[in-house]
Structure formats: C-alpha cells, structure tokens
Image (spheres, rainbow, N blue to C red):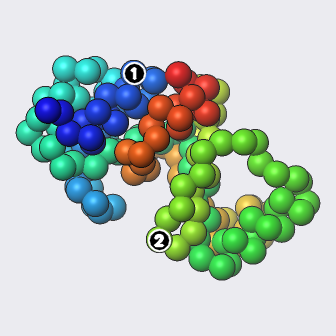
Amino acid sequence: MPSDLLQAALRYAASGLAVVPIQPRAKGPSLVPLEQATTNQATIRDWWGRRPNAGIGLPLGRLVVVDVDDEEGVASLARLVATYGNPPAGPVARTGSGLHLYFSTAGRLVESSFHLDGGGLGPGIDVLGEGQRACGASSAPTALARRLRLG
C-alpha cells in the first residue's frame, strides 16, 4: 500500500504543484536537486518508492511563503494588518516559531528577501521565493492547492 506521504505528494502534483523528496521530518536538504521538482506521477512514485518516509518539498518562486518568525514577526504582521488590512485568504501553516502564509503569484516569479525591515515588511518577516522550498503539509495538500487556485 502506498505511503501517506506518497499519496500526499501525488495529490500536490495532480493539483499542479511540483514536488521533490526532502529529509524526513526535518528542514534538511532536498534528496534530489530542487531543479528536478516535478508533477510527473511516475517519477514521484519512483522517488517515494525508494524513500517512503521522505518529506515533501515544494519549490518556491511562483508559490511564495511569507515566513513570520517569533514575537517580533507577529508584531510586524499585526502592524501590517492594522495599516493595510488582512492579506488575501490563503493557506497558513504553524511553524515551530511562527507562521507560514502561502500565496500564489499568478505565474510571476518572486525572489527571496530575508530580514526585511525599515522599508520592507518588518522585522521578523522573510519572503521565501525563487531558489527556496517549503515543506509540504501532508495533512491537506488538496486544500492547499485549491486555495492557491491550482486545483
């Protein structure tokens, strides 16, 4: 029987999100080069067939994560919401120290920006884009893709 992680990876791919296998339960490196991310079902079955416990990596660039870290980032996000209103509805994942807010870029490529402050989004907020990856949640990948209008 296919693993839950394989099934989740296949659901991401079916929704249009390319995936790569990553170290299990860790932020460690991808097990294949990020540039090899794919939606090809046969390749995904092969990868997870050899590594059934591999996590799911989602390459970023056209999918962007706003990484809100610690109390400083939460305070910055609160200031942004007070000034500009709520961000567009989208998936939110709790991390060990904050939140990841996921956004589709409607096909535009977005580069990463780290530790923006002053004229940026604020202390404790990073924008994860091109050349980065997020860890896919295996609990609701179809809902994630649907909310990104990819499924």
In the image, farthest residue toward the front: 1
What amino acid type should be assigned to the residue bearing mark 1?
A: Ala
- Relative to 57, residue 100 above or below: below
In the image, farthest residue toward the bottom: 71
Ranked by sequence position, the earlier of labels 1 and 2 is 1
Residue labelled with disc 1: 14
Task: Please state which of residues 104 and 25 is positioned toward the viewer in this rendering.
Answer: 25
Res 112 seen here: no
Q: Quadrant of residue 103?
A: top right
Which residue occupies 42% across, 45% down? 139
Residue 55 at x, y = what percent?
A: 28, 49
Which labelled disc corresponds to residue 53? none
Residue 7 at x, y = what percent?
A: 29, 33
> Please, what secondary structure does the residue beneath circle 2 have?
loop
Residue 31 at x, y = what percent?
A: 19, 47
Q: Quadrant of residue 98?
A: bottom right
In the image, farthest residue toward the right: 83
- Disc 1 crowd, CA 10 A, few/some/many (<14, 14-19, 20+): some
- Relative to 15, residue 7 above or below: below
- Relative to 67, residue 118 above or below: below
Res 50 seen here: yes
The reply to whether the C-beta atoms of the residues labelled 1 and 2 are less than 8 Å apart is no
Which residue occupies 14% across, 32% down? 1
Residue 95 at x, y = what percent?
A: 50, 65
Residue labelled with disc 2: 96
Q: How many marks?
A: 2
What amino acid type should be assigned to the residue bearing mark 2?
A: Gly
Tell me if 145 is positioned left or right of 89 in this view.
left
Which residue occupies 29% across, 62% down? 26
